[in-house]
């Protein structure tokens, strides 16, 4: 075996879930120890590589949100493991997970709503830097963060409450990127946006991922949203990954009925995606 092949075989993926299962008690079943459970994540094994752009799609209730919590180290699975570059990711304090938060950042659904309206843009971007031990953020770092998302430095002293919806969306993304993460996880990044803003945010993610060689996991119920950004698409259904294929193959020859249903829900699919 040559050296390059051996390296590929022994180097762990950037992010990995191994045989992860999570179940929750069903409401109203905690009586006389007869608790019944619903399996939300069912034996999921998944690897995400450095610099890879992956989409995770599925209908509401498929298990995407629970999988995200486990992947972000916010929830401990009933069984299985999560690792980053071979190191275990276990829910813990901010200090204990500082190494992981530095490498993996999260952009939640409706990220603008996570910004405190009374804070300035500068304070909002500097907050995670402070929590993760970077000290006071310099003006150059803050300006660079806004430059990354095509916003002028003059916004740094504006209150978040005075921003437009599109500006607030970009500030929230700038806050995650200020740490220069190796991997970005975004939950429904364009859900609820009008078409022009949706296209702007899609183009922004594409540009930033290429500029910083950053891996991405984009989670959505809309398969067309991730098809515009990702080369690999995972389809989740009833707590399991039922398809894991290159984008072009999955869109042209979907193998699972749930994938076909998701594709059928799209009015038109641009030819350039296939």
Image: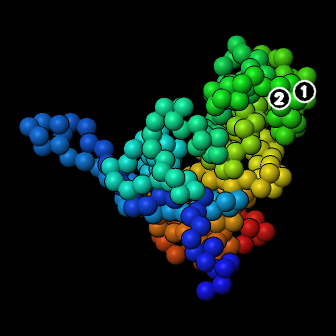
Q: Report the mark closest to the observer, 1 or 2.
A: 2
Residue that badge 1 annotates: 153
Label 2: which secondary element: helix
- Residue 111 shows in the view: yes
| x 64%, y 35%: residue | 110
Which residue is tagged 2? 142
| Mark seen at residue 213 | none
Compared with 272, 56 (above or below) is: above
Cα distance between the residues tagged 1 and 2: 8 Å
Furthest toward the bottom, the residue is 1
Q: Decide: marks 1, 2 in contact (CB < 8 A)?
A: yes
Which residue is located at x 73 percent, y 53 percent?
Answer: 214
Most distant residue in the top direction: 118
**Residue 196 position by quadrant:** top right
Locate residue 95, reporting x and y percent.
54, 31
Instruction: Residue 190: give x, y in percent of width and height.
Output: 69, 44
């Amino acid at each position: 075996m040559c050296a390059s092949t051996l390296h590929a075989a022994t180097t762990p993926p950037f992010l990995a879930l191994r045989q992860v299962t999570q179940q929750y008690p069903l409401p109203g079943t905690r009586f006389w120890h007869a608790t019944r459970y619903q399996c939300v994540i069912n034996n999921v094994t998944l690897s995400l590589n450095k610099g890879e752009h992956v989409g995770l799609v599925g209908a509401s209730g498929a298990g995407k949100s629970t999988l995200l919590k486990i992947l972000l180290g916010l929830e401990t699975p009933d069984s299985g493991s999560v690792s980053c570059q071979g190191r275990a990711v276990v829910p813990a304090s901010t200090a204990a997970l500082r190494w992981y938060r530095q490498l993996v950042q999260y952009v939640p659904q409706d990220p603008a709503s996570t910004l405190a309206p009374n804070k300035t843009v500068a304070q909002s971007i500097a907050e995670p830097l402070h929590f993760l031990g970077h000290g006071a953020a310099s003006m150059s770092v803050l300006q660079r963060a806004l430059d990354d998302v095509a916003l002028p430095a003059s916004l740094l002293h504006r209150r978040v409450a005075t921003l437009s919806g599109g500006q607030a969306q970009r500030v929230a993304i700038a806050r995650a990127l200020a740490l220069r993460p190796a991997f970005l996880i975004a939950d429904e990044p364009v859900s609820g946006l009008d078409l022009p803003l949706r296209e702007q945010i899609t183009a922004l993610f594409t540009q930033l991922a290429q500029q910083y060689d950053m891996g991405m996991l984009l989670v959505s119920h809309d398969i067309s949203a991730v098809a515009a950004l990702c080369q690999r698409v995972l389809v989740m259904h009833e707590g399991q990954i039922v398809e894991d294929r290159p984008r072009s193959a999955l869109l042209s020859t979907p193998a699972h009925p749930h994938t076909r249903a998701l594709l059928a829900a799209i009015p038109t699919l641009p030819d350039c995606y296939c």
